[in-house]
Image (cartoon, coloured by chain):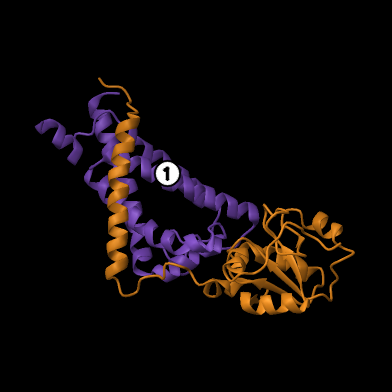
Chain colours: A purple, B orange
Amino acid sequence: MTDRWSDSLSLLCRWIVGVVFLYACIDKLAHPVAFAQNIANYRLLPMPLLHPFAWLLPVLEAVVALALLAGWQRRGAGFLAAGMSAVFIGAIGISLLRGLDISCGCFQTSGGHGVGLDLMLRDVGLLAASLVPMVAPTDRWSLDGRRCREH
Amino acid sequence: MSRLSLNAPTVMRQAGVLLAIVLAASVISWLVRPDRLALQANAEFYALDLPAPLVSVDDALVAYEEGLVVFIDTRPEASLDDAIPGAFIVRATSFADDLDEVRDFVFPEDPLILYGADAPVPVGDVAALFLARGHAEVRILQGGLAAWQAVGGPVEGEVGHD
């Protein structure tokens, strides 16, 4: 892979994933109670973990999104974004297998899209895009890249 | 030309830095936000979709001492060594088989209290199955076995009546 390809592809994927996660965290940060209800509907987490998880996940999405957009700690941010996507894929998959008719809680805490195969496919795409900044050899237009050139 | 690079130590170190920031930001936001969530979720609040009503551990203890109810252990990993004495194991994944084994002891007119490890929602699946089989009085132990043990509810190794 040429450096130019790596720079461009990493930037593109960082920004796509960054914008998606930034958009996703806003409603969750604003409505923690509704988001906790969304998570409870998945019937996956034990009660003691519900609120800590509901409080942490939107912050994780926000931090990862900002890191990806800025290109700061891009490899770690890509890894965490991929990890979140994998968890979402798993949660949606389990819900589909169980036949749960619940809203996904992805972007809107109230109403919103029901869980379905299309959401799983979207998250697979998100996972793939997240892996790019994690493994891209160079990423010139990022805070990480700027720091590398200066030193 | 450069090649794809999966530098695992760098990935982990960077992920660690970001997670530390997430943890710090979560704690700070939890301390300063007026609409913060309680650390411990209130099961009743999330029980709106449950097919059966919740029963508090205190009420369940009274019912247990009076011998008025049949306890059902619904934990997927339900084991013989830490169940409520006299409880029967009936799990969602093997409902028909489990029910078959206890059919001589558990009747549709018996009041049932179902419990899981802690969260009430998975127990709700078993409750729905019992209700579908015509059991009229099905309740779910609030806080599950964890809450039961926290208030000193008896737990022993024997499961099932003699």
Q: Residue at x 44, y 47 (%)?
A: A85
Q: Is residue B96 above or below residue B44?
A: above
Q: Quadrant of residue B9?
A: top left
Residue A136: image x %, image y %?
Answer: 30, 31
B53 horizontally vs B4: left or right: right
Question: Does residue B86 lie above or below A149 as drawn?
Answer: below
Q: Position of residue B15 (x, y in %)?
A: 32, 42
Foreground pick, A87 / B160: B160
Is any atom of residue B120 visible in this view?
no
Label 1 crowd bin: few (<14), some (14–19), many (20+), radius 10 Å: some
**Residue at the location (23% across, 43% down)?**
A72
**From this viewpoint, which residue is outermost toward the right?**
B104
| Residue at image location 86% in from the left, 58% down from the top | B100
Residue A96 showing in the rendered view: yes
Chain containing the residue with disc 1? A
Q: Position of residue A118 (x, y in %)?
A: 52, 51
Residue tagged 1: A83
Count of numbered badges drawn on the protein: 1
Q: Name which quarter of the figure residue B117 lies in.
A: bottom right
In the rendered structure, the answer to whether residue A37 lies left or right of residue A142 reads right
Give the amino acid at mark 1: Gly
Q: Is residue A7 above or below residue A53?
A: above
Name the residue nearer the viewer: B98 or B147: B147
Q: Position of residue B28 (x, y in %)?
A: 27, 63
In this view, the residue farthest toward the left is: A150
Nearer to me, B59 or A89: B59
Q: Quadrant of the C terminus of chain B?
A: bottom right
